[in-house]
């Protein structure tokens, strides 16, 4: 309060116009995406209203970021890796209504991604699809879905594939069990897994979000790793939401709402595409179709209900993931 | 002052009983300010240690007893206790042996570069644990400098429980060296010389003269290294592999529970760790007091 007052005074004294500040609490790999988006939005907002806005960013593991908001980090908007984390903010801290996800188009996910395979250059193990991941001679790197929100999509992608192929939960459980039996290291987050795969040279294939796989290739050069797109994968939907109680306290509701809604403009959708997230706008997606290979995507809702259900069944203590590691379980 | 009185009263009656005989046995200290400094000590310890810890206990108090037992005795959690306490103990033991040797060399033998070697000992203190973890993983991974030859010999270190041991040994070393070093430095060389002139061999002089003097400090160093290893997260997480039932440490289990917003479950496991660690540290402290008393009686 004192600081905002001080800031306001400083601006008044310098004759500049008071500037609104938003805090966007996001997850790890969106750093570049939001750098580009924030700059573009600030420009668009100023052109439209004449007001200046600056957006501060906070990045970290999705679950940890959500806990910070629950514990009092004053986020005007949250842009996390999965709806479950925002559900928890709504349920535990009551900072936004429980139906937050229906307030914006596409279940509040303006950009989406999917789970792909990153393999070593030349694909020496000839990994083409999910079935290759359970082969005895293939070693798979993926983070622990209990500590990494992003990795929960990996797990569900594998489960969904097996479910569609064989049609039964028992078969899916068996398939996922065999897959995780091939995982020699369970890192706590996606970056850790990428390091294990690339720097340590462990594993034949890394399960990764498509945007992070592109980033990895951009950073490492295309002579080290390449992307393999499976026949079927999950539509990973990282959602965005307004934190009602915080924006009302800050008096930033109008600009924060506009900040999130601007995602659905063609200009913003192009920013998503350029940062390797699949745009939800059909026209923009068509424009970038060379970049994003065609793949059949199923949604969380098709096979797992909602996040609360998926969390309970698969990732809560004693869920299907824990059962894989029971003494005498599949992954032993 | 009133708050310190309050906290003193809030302490359990055991604490009061512990204080009373000690105060009556010893003569009133000559140094002034006992009351004030004790007050400061109690307030400080309460604010920094007791209040956060009791918050953990309060959080678990929300759980029913069966839920608590379930949370802390799940096979996966028990496996993590075994790994964390076992590897911490092993690492602290190794550090006790080699830390003593390092301290001995640094104190007793002048050699070129001693100051640098001395400063190196503190590095594990100063290094961010994540940096240590990444560096060790790089070294011991199957494609690393140590890892590659070890892998050829069929020994896997990184991403196995052995990796946990390596990381814990690394972070624990300074504790032993830094507690033993000052004691060795104040130990007069004449003691050994006297022992030798009385016919003791070098080994006897060490075992009967030097070692008993150093032992209490060594136990303290061991306890510190052990305690630090139990709570260590940052460096271990990179090298452990983190497979449930195999290479998952207890602090990771706690983080995992937090990640699922299971605050009560996380603090339940933390409480078990706290209680066990406290019991072990208390035992080591008592042992240390006992050796010191025995030593006092001997000399």
Image (spheres, coloured by chain):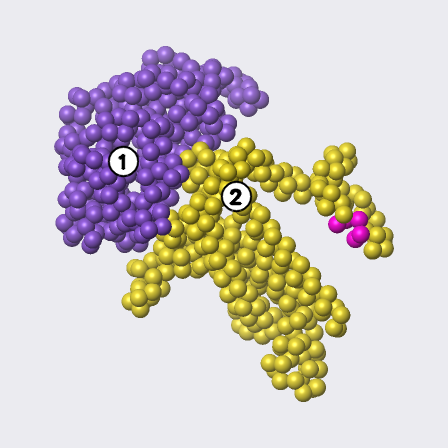
Image point (64%, 68%), residue name = B214
Image point (50%, 29%), residue name = A71
Above/below status of A62 relative to A282: below
Question: What's the colour of chain B in the image?
Answer: yellow
- Name the element at disc 1: helix
Q: Which residues are magenta?
A: B18-22
Seen from this angle, which residue lies furthest top?
Answer: A49
**Is there CB contact under 8 Å for labels 2 and 1?**
no
Magenta span has B19? yes
Q: Residues within 10 Å of mark 2 (few under 14, many from 20)?
A: many
The circle drawn on residue B270 is: 2
Above/below status of B153 relative to A212: below
Image point (58%, 38%), residue name = B57
CA gap, disc 2 to disc 1? 30 Å
Residue B6 place in picture, x, y as percent: 74, 35
The answer to whether one can see residue A230 in this image is: yes
The circle drawn on residue B171 is: none
Residue that mark 1 sits on: A156
């Amino acid at each position: 309060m004192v600081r905002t007052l001080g800031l306001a005074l400083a601006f008044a004294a310098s004759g500049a116009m008071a500037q609104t500040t938003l805090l966007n609490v996001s997850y790890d790999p969106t750093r570049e995406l939001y750098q580009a988006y924030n700059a573009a939005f600030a420009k668009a907002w100023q052109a439209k209203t004449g007001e200046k806005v600056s957006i501060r960013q906070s990045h970290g593991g999705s679950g940890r970021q959500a806990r910070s908001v629950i514990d009092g980090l004053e986020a005007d908007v949250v842009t996390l890796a999965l709806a479950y984390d925002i559900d928890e903010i709504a349920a535990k801290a009551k900072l936004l209504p429980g139906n937050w996800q229906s307030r914006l188009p596409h279940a509040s996910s303006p950009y989406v991604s999917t789970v792909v395979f990153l393999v070593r250059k030349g694909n020496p193990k000839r990994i083409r699809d999910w079935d290759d991941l359970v082969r005895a001679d293939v070693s798979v790197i993926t983070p622990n879905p209990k500590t990494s929100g992003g990795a929960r999509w990996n797990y569900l992608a594998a489960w969904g594939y097996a479910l569609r192929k064989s049609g039964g939960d028992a078969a899916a459980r068996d398939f996922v069990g065999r897959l995780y039996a091939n995982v020699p290291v369970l890192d706590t987050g996606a970056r850790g897994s990428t390091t294990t795969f690339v720097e340590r040279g462990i594993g034949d294939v890394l399960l990764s979000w498509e945007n992070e796989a592109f980033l990895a290739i951009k950073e490492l050069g295309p002579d080290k790793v390449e992307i393999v797109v499976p026949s079927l994968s999950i539509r990973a939907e990282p959602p965005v939401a307004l934190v009602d109680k915080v924006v009302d306290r800050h008096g930033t509701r109008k600009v924060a709402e506009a900040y999130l809604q601007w995602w659905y403009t063609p200009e913003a959708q192009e920013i998503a595409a350029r940062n390797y997230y699949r745009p939800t706008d059909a026209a923009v997606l068509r424009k970038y179709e060379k970049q994003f290979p065609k793949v059949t995507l199923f949604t969380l809702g098709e096979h797992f209900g909602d996040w609360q259900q998926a969390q309970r069944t698969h990732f809560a203590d004693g869920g299907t993931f824990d059962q894989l590691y029971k003494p005498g379980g599949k992954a032993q | 002052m009133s708050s310190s009185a309050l906290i003193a009263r809030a302490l359990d009656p055991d604490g009061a009983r512990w204080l009373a005989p000690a105060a009556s046995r010893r003569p009133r200290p000559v140094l002034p300010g006992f009351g004030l400094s004790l007050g400061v000590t109690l307030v400080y310890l309460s604010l920094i240690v007791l209040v956060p810890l009791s918050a953990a206990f309060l959080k678990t108090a929300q759980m029913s007893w069966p839920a608590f037992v379930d949370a802390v005795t799940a096979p996966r959690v028990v496996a993590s206790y075994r790994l964390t306490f076992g590897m911490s103990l092993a690492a602290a033991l190794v550090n006790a042996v080699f830390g003593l040797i390092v301290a001995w060399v640094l104190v007793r033998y002048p050699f070129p570069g001693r100051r640098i070697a001395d400063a190196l000992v503190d590095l594990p203190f100063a290094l961010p644990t994540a940096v240590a973890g990444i560096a060790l993983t790089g070294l011991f991974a199957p494609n690393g400098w140590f890892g590659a030859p070890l892998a050829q010999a069929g020994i896997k270190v990184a991403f196995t429980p052995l990796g946990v041991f390596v990381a814990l040994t690394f972070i624990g070393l300074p504790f032993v060296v830094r507690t033993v070093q000052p004691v060795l430095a104040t130990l007069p060389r004449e003691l050994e010389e006297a022992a030798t002139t009385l016919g003791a061999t070098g080994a006897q002089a060490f075992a009967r003269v030097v070692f008993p003097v150093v032992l209490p400090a060594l136990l303290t160093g061991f306890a510190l290294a052990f305690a630090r290893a139990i709570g260590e997260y940052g460096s271990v997480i990179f090298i452990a592999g983190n497979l449930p039932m195999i290479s998952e440490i207890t602090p990771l289990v706690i983080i995992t529970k937090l990640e699922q917003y299971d605050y009560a479950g996380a603090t339940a496991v933390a409480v078990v760790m706290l209680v066990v660690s406290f019991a072990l540290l208390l035992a080591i402290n008592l042992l240390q007091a006992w050796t010191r008393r025995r030593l006092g009686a001997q000399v």
